[in-house]
Amino acid sequence: MGSLLMSKRLLLLLPILAAALAPARDKAETWTELRSPHFVVVTNANEKQGRRVADQFERMRSVFQAAFPTLQIDPGSPIIVLAIKDEKDFKALEPQDYLAKGSVKLGGLFLRAPDKNYVLMRLDAEGDHPYAVVYHEYTHLLLSKSADWMPLWLNEGLAEFYQNSDIHEKDVSLGEPSADNLALLKQSKLLPLATLFTVDEKSPYYHEEDKGSIFYAESWALTHYILFKDRQEKTHRSGDYIDLVQQHVDAVTAATRAFGDLKVLQNALQAYVRQESFHYLNAAISTSVDEASFQAQALTAAQSEAVRADFLAYNGRTADAQALLDNVLHDDPNNVSALETTGYLEFRQGHLEEARKRYAQAVQLDSQSFLAQYYFAAMSMNGTVAPSDEAQVETSLRAAIKLNPSFAPAYGGLAVFLGMRNRNLEEARRMGLTAVSLDPANVGYRMTVANVLLAMSKGKNAVEVLRNAAKVAKTPEESQAVANLLTNAQAYAAAQEAGANLNQHVGQEMPGQKPGPARDTDVPRLAHRKEFVASGPHHFVVGVLRNVHCDNPNLDLAVTSGAKTLTLHSDNYFKIQFSALGFQPSGDLNPCHDLESKSAKVEYVESADKTDAPHLLGIELHK
């Protein structure tokens, strides 16, 4: 039972299989959708089993809500549970990596993307805890915001810990021992803890059946041991460990600092799994569920295929997804779900204009789809937004927010849209902060807020936001992006402070006294410039940069492209987005000295005031 993390990065995938390869439909198969207050269950079993699954998810949610009242347990994206009746149909949906011979046999998995939350589970599970997979995958759902920093052993150990829960109307038992895990651990050699702590999604201990089983079992045992030892001895070693890994301390070092000598811990764990009795928690927690509120409907063949196609698309099984989509759109060309999924596949393959068209169709057909509204806007913003589309892009972002007030990407998108147009900047700042509050781990939202603050001439505030962003950056790429923007923001804040000091100095001069000369390179110019108002779409031109002139922090330059020369201006060169194509620049870039005679692709926007030069937004340097 694994946690599969998906990203929205642009990927170039292999060509899709032809529609002729699409499998024929099984006309005898029926699918049912059950909607409970917090979940959508889609099943090819019967309605009774679907209701039971929805009931169990709702009860598990109640347990976590009571146990962790400060935890955000309802994500901003839909939670869709695919409850599959048997192994054969399960394999038609599970990740490709698990279909190979010798792979771990899954009973379920959790798939997370920025805009979707899927749980895939088998209904033919056996044993004392038939809903173990439900509890396991729901635990992954709640831990999903921590998955980027939490070591895999702890993520899976907690899921295994909670999967053997017994949930009743008025009480719940948590942390009951797993008979299967204990039997395996007693007859197998434990993994060295240094190995356990470093297993990741690419490790054979996570995928191969003979190795994966011991990884899950030992992860459960260590989690169970540490949690109950903390409880009995009133210590907080588990919390200390979590704090350390959150601070990017590597998993082995963090374990040594939090748990002590790993050899001692290994021996203690070895003895722990061989004991005859184990503690568990029993708590009086009411988990009553109003089943009368559940709504059930039979799905058509096209509807069920659209749901499965979407899951397969997010699951990376592109050809299988496309085959189902071809079936759906052949019978129902206006199926909104299928159009959205097709747009997502086009996006992943880099076909941005095709993706935009698909989402535009979905918006026109169903204005109540927050995802269609958001992705139409996102795809439109990815390129040049035509003047005729600007109003619809903004309208779609606002519609997505209204339809789903918990969906962070829509707030982030609106903040970017307004910030790039230097319009309604205070609202843009609020939108960006809302996105951060909904998804604190997303570094991109924090950088958006910083860019908006720079556009508002609030350099110090931008620096503060970026310093906090640096603390939550998870990858080297994120850390570098934050560091680059922070350098610009600090330089801008310093220029602002120098200008303010000069103003104060000039104001303190004695009447009639002439101020001393100021060096042109040391202080920013204080001449007032009217506020810039953008007009029309963003434009791009490729050419050679000439006549670069700085009047700190202003920047003027010309772009020579063939026989044409275009003059551009920036009120603040710290706001310009600099990048390089085909090479890695050495050292820091000084726009005032390093741009002259360089080949570049330049992004700019016209001014509403035709007497004002177009404003410079971005420079992509070419080798």
Image: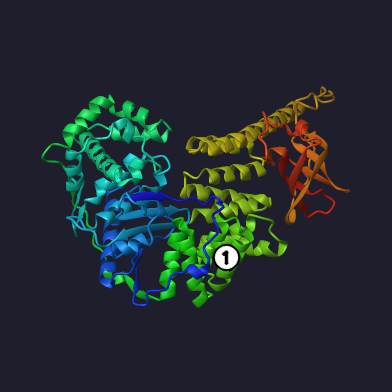
Report the residue marked by disc 1.
359
Residue 77 % position (x, y): 44, 58
Query: Which of these two is toward me, 500 or 504?
Result: 500
Residue 510 % position (x, y): 79, 23
Q: Is residue 163 left or right of residue 332?
A: left
Query: Which of these two is toward me, 232 or 47?
Result: 47
Query: Which of these two is toward me, 453 or 299?
Result: 299
Q: Is residue 323 above or below residue 551?
A: below
Q: Residue furthest right?
A: 563
Query: Which of these two is toward me, 606 or 33?
Result: 33
Query: Which residue appears at 48% of the width and 38% of the height?
Result: 472
Disc 1 residue type (three-letter): Tyr
Residue 226: name its quadrant. top left
Residue 259 % position (x, y): 28, 28
Q: Is residue 95 above or below residue 35?
A: above
Report whether residue 561 is seen.
yes
